Image: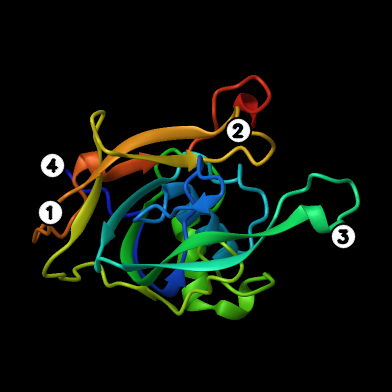
Amino acid sequence: MTKTTEKMLALEVEVPIASFRQSRAREYAESYPVPPPSTIYGMLLSMVGEMDRYKHCGTRLAIALLTQPQKSTTIRTFRRFKKKDIHDPSNARPDYQELLTDVRFIAWVDAGTDNSQLTLPERLEIAFANPAAINRFGGLCLGESRDLVNAVTLLPKNHQVKLLRWLVRDENGFLTLPYWVDHVGSKGTAWQRYLILEPSELSYPPETAWTVIQASLYPSTAFLC
């Protein structure tokens, strides 16, 4: 297998507590066991201060877990806008939410067919080399604004990791994760089925580990990428 490394980098990400709410969860906010590709893509855009999520369509991501996060359940207030008045008490109610503790993973970022003047991997490299050059706001989060990222480390080209649990595409996989989310309704959300492999010493993403970040091919969004 030929490795295309010129426009690819690997990032180790550490998040103490996070929740990746399943798209179809209602009263009980279950969490996916792994951050979806769409969530990781959003975090990467935040790192470089990019607000246009269509900017780097065509980027490829590969994800490998370093830990098996512990799951717990908490009760918190959720807001659902049933009434026009945002302060109406009926818009808020307590519900249960699953949390994951000690989320650590490696994300490989490849330019793929990203045709921007500066690809996402190139912009991430600039962010590490010269943070003052990045114009962004807010804390860096993975998912909800509460779930702050503790550390993001740019790994050297020939880094060695003993054991990784790869997230791979599989049409019979038990996980259905979004790689593109429609934030107005759900018609434009795009999904892929995955498996989480048993720990292995494979240190470079297999072909089935790559997910292309691409908007759903609906007429309203297809022309944007």
How many marks can you see? 4
Residue for badge 1: 198
Image position of 56 with respect to 101: above or below? above
Q: Where 202 sits versus 194, above or below?
A: below
Q: Which residue is mark 4?
A: 1
Residue 66 locus on image (x, y percent): 24, 67
Residue type indicated by callout 1:
Glu
Q: Residue 211's x, y, as percent?
A: 36, 41
Q: Nearer the viewer, mark 3 or mark 2?
A: 3
The alpha-carbon separation of the residues under discs 3 and 4 comes to 57 Å
Q: Decide: marks 3, 4 in contact (CB < 8 A)? A: no
Residue at mark 3: 87
Mark found first going from the N terminus, 3 or 2: 3
Point out residue 30 in the picture as x, y percentages from the top left corner.
45, 53
Q: Is residue 143 visible?
A: no
Q: Which of 104 and 214 lies nearest the eye of the viewer? A: 104
Give the image location of residue 171, x and y in percent.
26, 28
Name the residue tied to disc 2.
Answer: 186
Element on which disc 1 rests = loop
Please state which of the two labelled residues, at mark 3 or mark 4, is closer to the viewer. Answer: 3
Q: Secondary structure at mark 2?
A: loop
Q: Look at label 3 and name its amino acid.
A: His
What SS does tag 4 mark? loop
